[in-house]
Image (tube, rainbow, N blue to C red):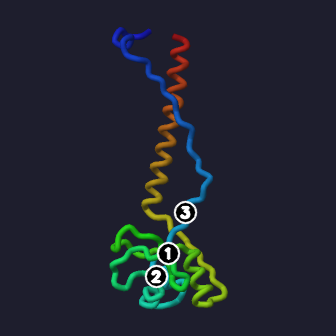
Amino acid sequence: MERPEDQNRPREEFTLAPEVETSEPLPEPLLSIDDVQRVLQRSRATIYRYTNTDPKGKRLNLPYNPHKLNPEHRLSLRDPLQFHPAEVARYAQDVLKIRNVNIEVVQNPSETDDVLKAILEELRGIRQLLGEWAEDRAARREKG
């Protein structure tokens, strides 16, 4: 039985969006200067010398240069240089003439990843409870 104050309010309809599952792979993580230094076994100064950047530091995101190690695009000169693993492999093979290049990027789970996974589990639990609540409410309305 509806209360008199409920008669004037519009009925609320709850629909739950289908759960989103993406089949797209996550983007590959980028390599920092330190990572490139470890992979190519060169000094940090040498890596900076190889990199396609403006030596005067005035221009950002220079055009592609096949003879240099090309970093990913940056928004600011203060952003750290980062490199795509395929670009580092290309540079090692084509320019440095290193024959067998195997770049393996391993992401260590961080505390942030653990928190995000916990939040995701909590949201899934809330979604399930809302679904049960909506079904229960619909069943009570039908009996009504």
Find residue 110 and report its horizontal and vertical position in percent: 46, 64
Query: Which amino acid, mark 3?
Result: Pro
- Dividing the picture into quadrants, the one containing residue 92 is bottom right
Separation of marks 1 and 2 at Cα, in angstroms = 11 Å
In the shown orientation, is residue 82 left or right of residue 5?
Answer: right
Give percent across and percent down for residue 60. Answer: 39, 74
Q: Residue at x 56, y 60 (%)?
A: 26
Pointer 1: what residue?
83
| Residue at which label 2 appears | 52
Query: What is the number of the mark on residue 27?
Result: 3
Q: Secondary structure at mark 1?
A: loop
- 57 and 33: which one is in front? 57
Instruction: Please indicate whether residue 4 sits to the left or right of residue 107 in the image.
Output: left
The residue shown at (59%, 80%) is 89
Mark 3 nearby-residue class (10 Å; few <14, some 14–19, many ≥20) = few
Q: Earlier in the sequence, mark 1 or mark 3?
A: 3
Q: Is residue 39 above or below residue 132?
A: below
Q: Of tags 1 and 2, which is closer to the observer?
A: 2
Q: Secondary structure at mark 2?
A: loop
In front of the other: label 3 or label 2?
Answer: 2
Secondary structure of residue under mark 3 = loop
Gap between marks 1 and 3 measured at Cα: 13 Å
Q: Are the two marked residues, 1 and 3, in contact with CB atoms closer than 8 angstroms?
A: no
Q: Which quarter shows the N terminus?
A: top left
Give the residue displayed 50% in from the left and 71% down from the top. 30
The residue sitting at 44% across, 18% down in the picture is: 11
Contact between marks 3 and 2 (CB within 8 A): the answer is no
Earlier in the chain: of badge 1 and badge 2, it is 2
- Label 3 – label 2 distance at C-alpha: 23 Å
First in sequence: mark 3 or mark 2? 3
Q: Which of 32 and 133 lies nearest the eye of the viewer?
A: 32
Q: How many numbered dots are placed on residues in this image?
A: 3
